[in-house]
């Protein structure tokens, strides 16, 4: 590692510190075209207050590792369920939102099936997403 980079990097994450970031931002301002990524850990203070600084530091270090190893290439190289190497998109989250109203879901099974359906719809969107089920889907009962 370059000594000047090491000197101005965060000791916690190994990522560039403010001095190096500012230098790169100044370079970016003079370019014809480029992109700047700005990261912020939402609700991190509450997490850190709840679980303590050691757990908070673990979150920061893990994010730094993900950024260093994967973000620049835009994917994760891993083994799929068939044991084959495959490029996967970076981690995202898909959320089903199920507004609950009295008598909307007649059973726990109906609720969980609706949640699975909503999650499937959310997964059809790219990146992190959520899908709100405005109507309870028709659940076809299995007859056995």
Image (cartoon, helix red, strand yellow):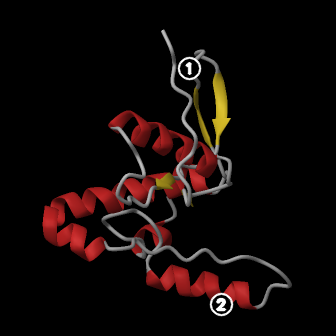
The foreground one among 112 and 28 is 112
Q: Residue at x 73, y 90 (%)?
A: 29
Numbered label attached to residue 71: none
Residue located beneath label 2 in the image? 26
Q: Secondary structure at mark 2?
A: helix
Residue 143 lies, in percent from the top left, at 51, 14
Question: At 70% from the left edge and 85% from the top edge, which residue is drawn?
Answer: 27
Image coordinates of residue 3 in percent, x first then y, are 46, 67
Q: Is residue 48 left or right of residue 119?
A: left
Residue at mark 2 to residue at mark 1: CA–CA distance: 44 Å
Which quadrant of the structure image shows residue 32? bottom right
Residue 114 horizontal side relative to residue 53, left or right:
right
Residue 81's tag is: 1
Which of the two discs, 2 and 1, labels the residue nearer the N terminus? 2
The local secondary structure at tag 1 comes to: loop
Closer to us: mark 2 or mark 1? Answer: 1
Instruction: Please identify the residue farthest to the top as the structure is shown.
Output: 144
Whether residue 2 is visible: yes
Residue 104, percent from left and from top: 42, 52
Who's the residue at 60% across and 15% down the image? Answer: 82
Q: At 40% from the left edge and 46% from the top edge, which residue is drawn?
A: 105
In the picture, measured across the screen, residue 143 lies left or right of residue 84, that is left
Whole-percent x, y for residue 116 in the image: 50, 39
């Amino acid at each position: 590692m370059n000594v000047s980079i090491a000197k101005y990097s965060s000791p916690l994450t190994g990522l560039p510190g403010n001095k190096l970031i500012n230098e790169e931002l100044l370079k970016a301002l003079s370019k014809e075209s480029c992109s700047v990524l700005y990261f912020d850990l939402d609700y991190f203070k509450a997490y850190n207050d709840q679980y303590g600084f050691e757990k908070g530091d673990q979150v920061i270090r893990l994010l730094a590792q993900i950024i260093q190893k994967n973000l620049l290439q835009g994917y994760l190289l891993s083994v799929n369920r068939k044991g084959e190497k495959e490029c996967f998109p970076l981690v995202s989250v898909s959320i089903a939102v199920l507004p609950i109203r009295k008598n909307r879901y007649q059973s726990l099974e109906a609720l969980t099936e609706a949640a699975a359906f909503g999650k499937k719809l959310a997964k059809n969107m790219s990146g992190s997403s959520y899908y709100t089920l405005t109507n309870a889907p028709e659940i076809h009962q299995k007859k056995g």
